Amino acid sequence: MPSLLHSLLLFSSTPKPLLLANSPAYDGPVDANSPRPKSYHTITAISKTKSETKINNKDEDDYHATLKALNSKGRFPRKSLGQHYMLNSSVNEELVAAADVQEGDLVVEIGPGTGSLTNVLVDAGATVLAIEKDPYMAALVMERFSSLDHVKVLLEDFTKCHIRSHLSTISQSGRNSSGVKPQYAKVVSNLPFNISTEVIKQLLPMGDIFSEVVLLLQEEAAVRLVDSSSGSSEYRPINIFINFYSNPEYRFKVPRTNFFPQPKVDAAVVSFRLKQPVDYPPVSSAKSFFSMVNSAFNGKRKMLRKTLQHICPSLEIEEALVSAGLPPTARPEELALEDFVRLHNSIAKA
């Protein structure tokens, strides 16, 4: 896809390793031939074994391969970027399976790291647009897949990039690796924990270009985002947001021993099947709807007639609640998505 090269970064040379002995982000190259740390002796496979899903003509991504890749750039995982690299190919295979990646799919991967998940996506037949903020890791992935024209690496911060523009370029270039132009793209990513909420907020309203978003997140956050319901102590505006734009599902847990360096928490894979814009809940304005929801939760334990009185007088809020089939003393934690939709529409009519 030659025309795609205009918007994608192609690395003509390998940047020199940045070796700062006194830097807190760098502890010196690790010996890939040394014994593995005790905490990594057992890597827990989720369900598929290597014999069940084989990566064709590619080296397996494991502890030693990861260290070798990092050492090739003189790098060490950077805490500031939330870098924790996957050591278990079986987990990557499960991640790709959760997204039902098929031959010819166009997949966006955020933070490819050493390219271990990219490897599995390629093996599944996907065209991959990998977006990496770290220039050293971007160069590594570009070199690793330099022989494949259906793996493109973009050196950008995903939270600041214009993903619609990049996907439009790919679409205009014609076909993907299978010669078929997919209607929707997918997102599959082992996401840095520190940007997970920001990325979710950016991706979920894009049901017009993405069909599926499958992310590996911190497990506690995954449970909170997917399973929290009205009445729960973890119920937040983000839960309303997620269910407004998608149908979320907790898929499986990934123990912390599968990562290097090992984080302090376990992870989990969550899938978000994005709704098409025509399927969004019927509100006159999504902007005003979420403004109301956020205001409602500013005083989570307070009654809505108090927290929303800046929108209209308390008496009108009570009337809108009753009109929406809710008690006049309702609190935000008691309302499900459809309740907020009815309340918003009742207020809008007042």
Image (cartoon, helix red, strand yellow):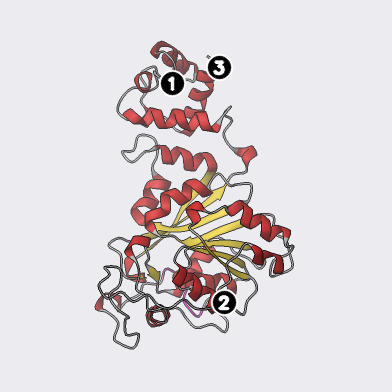
Task: Report the residue marked by disc 1.
Answer: 326
Q: Quadrant of residue 231?
A: top left
Q: State the residue lying farthest toward the bottom.
A: 33
| Cα–Cα gap, marks 2 and 3 | 60 Å
Which residue appears at 34% of the width and 61% of the height?
80
| Cα–Cα gap, marks 2 and 1 | 62 Å
Q: Which comes before the other along the chain, label 1 or label 3?
A: 1
Q: Which label belongs to residue 298?
A: none
Which residue appears at 67% of the width and 61% of the height?
170
| Cα–Cα gap, marks 1 and 3 | 16 Å
Give the total number of marks visible in the rendering. Answer: 3
SS for dot 3: helix
In magenta, the rendered stretch is 46-51
Relative depth, front residue between 113 and 342: 113
- Check disc 3: other Cα within 10 Å, few if <14, some if 14-19, many if 20+: few
Amino acid type at mark 1 = Leu
Which residue appears at 67% of the width and 58% of the height?
169
Left or right of 61? Residue 233 is left
- Check disc 2: other Cα within 10 Å, few if <14, some if 14-19, many if 20+: few
SS for dot 2: loop
Amino acid type at mark 2 = Ser
**What percent of the width, then of the height, locates residue 116?**
48, 73
Task: Report the residue marked by disc 3.
Answer: 349
State the predominant SS element of the stretch in magenta.
loop
Task: Report the residue marked by disc 2.
Answer: 12
